[in-house]
């Protein structure tokens, strides 16, 4: 603050102390960690025990009383995992202060999965205790994927794994432990690919299906089965992972199915006269 008096300038520093003090909180889902704030009046005295203060978190207001002689008020945090802003409101001075609340799920180290059909990639999660450390072996986690439920047990590192032996497509997997739930996307890529084909009657065209291994590389020397017009044909992939079938059918439109190790794709073949 600067004051001018009798052509003299006086400068003083004024420190404005807050009347609400709180700290950011990081806690594991539904453990015993609480949010605390300390409240003073305008003279710097602690608010008296029984004085009502207000907390606002996630859009909900909570009235709480000062407990003890240190101006302390507490709010239990029973929110789902995520980040929140909590505002502590001093009803005596009108001042408010904001802090961040971070709730960590008990299921961590999970991620979305993109994998090729029936490769060895698994969905994994780690289970932690209230103190943030990994649980031991034998804790049960329930999974739901594609409407089917599975239960799996943690290993000694608190990690639980689920095999993903699904047909190509997009899925959501949900893991549940106690009251904690997490979800991730799972995308299963087909190891077979092919395109619809248009041709003229006996023009020498061949239908080609491409096969890759679990890493997406061309897969040679493998048998691909074709089903067209109710007749089965087996063809072996070449060095480029391609299996080819001569098409000597009458004019018309046909559905051809290519199959390998339980994976199937369908295409249309249109033959003009």
Image: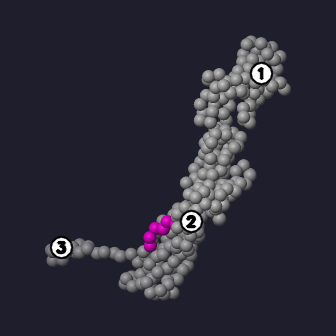
Label 3, on which residue?
A: 9
Q: Which residue is drawn at 52% across and 63% down?
A: 133
Mark 2 or 1, closer to the camera: 2
Task: For marks 2 and 1, give the CA distance.
Answer: 60 Å
Res. 184 in view: no
Asked whether, in this view, residue 230 is left or right of residue 200, the answer is right
Which of the 4 quarters of the picture holds residue 219? Answer: top right
Lower sequence index among marks 2 and 1: 2
Q: In this view, does 66 lie above or below 8?
A: below
Q: Residue at x 72, y 18 (%)?
A: 206
Task: For marks 2 and 3, give the CA distance.
Answer: 62 Å
How would you classify the magenta stretch by its main secondary structure? strand
Identify the secondary structure beneath mark 3.
strand
Label 1, on which residue?
A: 270
Identify the secondary structure beneath mark 1.
strand
Which percent across, then down, holds residue 51? 50, 85
Lower sequence index among marks 3 and 1: 3
Q: Which mark is residue 129?
A: 2
């Amino acid at each position: 603050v600067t004051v001018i008096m009798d052509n003299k300038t006086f400068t003083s520093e004024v420190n404005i102390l807050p009347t609400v003090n709180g700290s950011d909180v990081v806690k594991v889902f539904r453990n015993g960690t609480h949010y605390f704030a300390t409240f003073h009046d305008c003279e710097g005295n602690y608010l008296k025990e029984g004085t009502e203060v207000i907390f606002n978190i996630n859009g909900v207001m909570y009235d709480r009383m000062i407990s003890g002689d240190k101006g302390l008020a507490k709010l239990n945090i029973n929110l789902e995992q995520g980040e929140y802003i909590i505002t502590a409101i001093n009803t005596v001075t009108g001042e408010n202060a904001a802090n961040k609340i971070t709730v960590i799920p008990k299921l961590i180290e999970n991620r979305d999965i993109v994998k090729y059909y029936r490769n060895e990639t698994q969905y994994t999660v780690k289970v932690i205790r209230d103190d943030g450390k990994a649980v031991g072996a034998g804790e049960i986690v329930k999974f739901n994927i594609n409407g089917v439920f599975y239960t799996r047990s943690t290993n000694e590192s608190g990690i639980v794994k689920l095999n993903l032996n699904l047909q190509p497509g997009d899925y959501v997997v949900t893991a549940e432990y106690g009251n904690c739930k997490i979800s991730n996307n799972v995308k299963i890529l087909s190891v077979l690919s092919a395109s619809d084909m248009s041709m003229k009657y006996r023009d020498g065209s061949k239908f080609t299906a491409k096969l890759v291994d679990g890493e997406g590389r061309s897969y040679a020397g493998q048998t691909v089965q074709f089903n067209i017009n109710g007749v089965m044909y087996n063809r072996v992939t070449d060095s480029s992972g391609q299996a080819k079938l001569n098409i000597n059918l009458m004019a018309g439109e046909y559905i051809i199915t290519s199959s390998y190790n339980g994976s199937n794709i369908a295409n249309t073949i249109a033959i003009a006269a």
